[in-house]
Amino acid sequence: MTNSQSDMWSPKITQAPTIPPVELMKQQASALVNYTHGLVTADVTVKAYPEKLGSLFSSPQEPYFEATFWLGVPTLDYRFLLLTARYGLEVWPVLISPSGQDSVEVPDQPAFETALRALLSSERTTKIVNTLMAHA
């Protein structure tokens, strides 16, 4: 049997054209640990849900993913939820929900990167990280 007969997958399957939000969040989590020398850590987790997410997605059967970005202080066994990002199988758009703030929908990867940069470099986030470092 030749490879083409045993391989029934579409030749259109390729590497993802964009980096998913969870990977971009993980990159920034690693960067924070370097900035704080491990005094404040960051952890990104992702869960898959089989049900529809509000009106963000058109198909009632479409599952969605929820990525959460946690800040932690290992010496205190403390975690703070910084943000949640929700997205469907198509990845974009993404609904970003910073802790204690209104959610924002972003249409694509560049907009997500801009929103994530604004959140991570904001005065509020800087104050949170500095406060956590002081307690470490």
Image (spheres, rainbow, N blue to C red):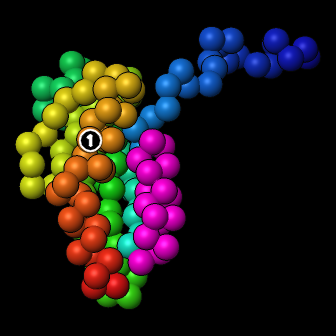
Q: Where in the figure is residue 61, as x and y percent of width and height?
A: 27, 27
Q: Which residue is mark 1?
A: 118
Classify the position of the C terminus by image quarter: bottom left
Q: Where in the figure is residue 88, as x and y percent of width and height?
A: 32, 30
Q: Residue type at mark 1?
A: Ala
In the displayed structure, 99 sits above or below 20; it is: below
**Magenta span covers which residues?**
23-39
Classify the position of the N terminus by image quarter: top right
Residue shown at the point (31%, 26%) measured from the top left: 111
Q: Main secondary structure of the magenta part?
A: helix
Residue shown at the point (63%, 11%) measured from the top left: 12
Location of residue 127 (image quadrant): bottom left
Residue shown at the point (18%, 49%) measured from the top left: 98
In the displayed structure, 37 sits above or below 135; it is: above
Which residue occupies the foreground of this view, 14 or 61?
14
Residue shown at the point (49%, 49%) measured from the top left: 27
Which residue occupies the foreground of this view, 91 or 104?
104
Location of residue 133 (image quadrant): bottom left
* Relative side of 90 to 107, left or right: right
